[in-house]
Image: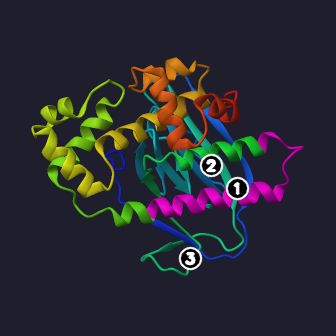
Amino acid sequence: MSDSLQNKPRIFGCKTNDPIKFLVCGQLISPSGFLHHRRSFDENVLIMVTEGTLYITANNAPFSLVPGQYIFLKAGEEHYGHRPSDGRLSYLWAHFRSDCGFETVNNDSSEYTYLLPEALALSDSGRTAQLFHQLMDMSLEEKLYTQNMSDYAMSLLLMELTQEYFRDRDSSDKLPLAVVSAREWIKNHYYLPFDVRSLAEAVGYSADYLSSLFKQSTGISIVRYTNRLRIKTAKTLLSNYDITIKEAAFSCGFSDEKYFMKVFKQLEGITPSQYKNSFGRKNIN
């Protein structure tokens, strides 16, 4: 888990057979110096950061959230910004409630329909962001989608976050130092073209040894891990900014536009253009 999640997050559980009640969602974009208002709501709030750093205190615990991290703000608890953002900040947000409510839990009981950490660094799959954008699309197309569909979309988003929690918990066993070093290096340099040999040299291991150990420890190759991270970034760029496919490709480390399109289609099942047309929306505060 990222160092920016400085506090040990609480776990919230909800027992219900009914869909979550969706209320409203949107996207905040601030060019600089955003400071979250001090307030408390009767409904729950979900925030997922897509750019910059959000400094927010919830229930007297400060959090610093970077892209790919979310925070769950429990109904009835005060939250506020404890420091202005440094430069540009963007995040997706949604308000929702459940008649059963969310309670703090001390174990991973299967009796809960939803189990949500107070804050979590999301995986590289990009599914959570995609579901969040689908929810936003539904909320904007009032004539096409019913309240029930939005409720189920909100429920699906929270179910995906529950699965993210289980994946994060189940992968908590320590990976070999070589693999940890390689993943951290990739996360810091994915936007630059590089090959396995240059990565191995950077972290101090042979290319063959690192490739074999990485695949054995994570279940995927270094190339596939890197491509997943790059495509996740490309999806964020395509859905939030008016850029071309070529610009998206080069911005996340692909030096070949056609190869980028091929990898995107393999991982997402649609082309970058189809994704941009489906999920690209005008930014709304």
Residue in front for this viewpoint, 195 or 19: 195
The residue singled out by tag 2 in the image is 131
Q: What kind of residue is marked 2? A: Leu
Q: What residue range appears in magenta? A: 139-165
| Disc on res. 153 | 1
For marks 1 and 3, the one nearer the N-term is: 3
Q: Percent position (x, y) of residue 84?
A: 46, 32
Residue in front for this viewpoint, 260 or 124: 260
Q: Considering the numbered disc 2 on the image, is that residue within a helix, a strand or a loop? A: helix
Q: What kind of residue is marked 1? A: Ala
Residue in front for this viewpoint, 30 or 139: 139
Q: Does residue 258 lie above or below 114 as drawn? A: above
| Disc on res. 112 | 3
Q: Main secondary structure of the magenta part?
A: helix
Q: Nearer the viewer, mark 2 or mark 3?
A: 2
Q: How is the image coloured?
A: rainbow
Residue at figure coordinates x 26%, y 52% from the top left: 215
Residue at figure coordinates x 73%, y 56% from the top left: 22
Residue at figure coordinates x 35%, y 44% from the top left: 4
CA gap between label 2 and label 3 equals 21 Å
Residue at figure coordinates x 48%, y 38% from the top left: 232
- Badge 2: how crowded within 10 Å, few (<14), some, or many (20+)? some
For marks 2 and 1, the one nearer the N-term is: 2
Q: Quadrant of residue 64?
A: top left
Q: Quadrant of residue 75?
A: bottom right
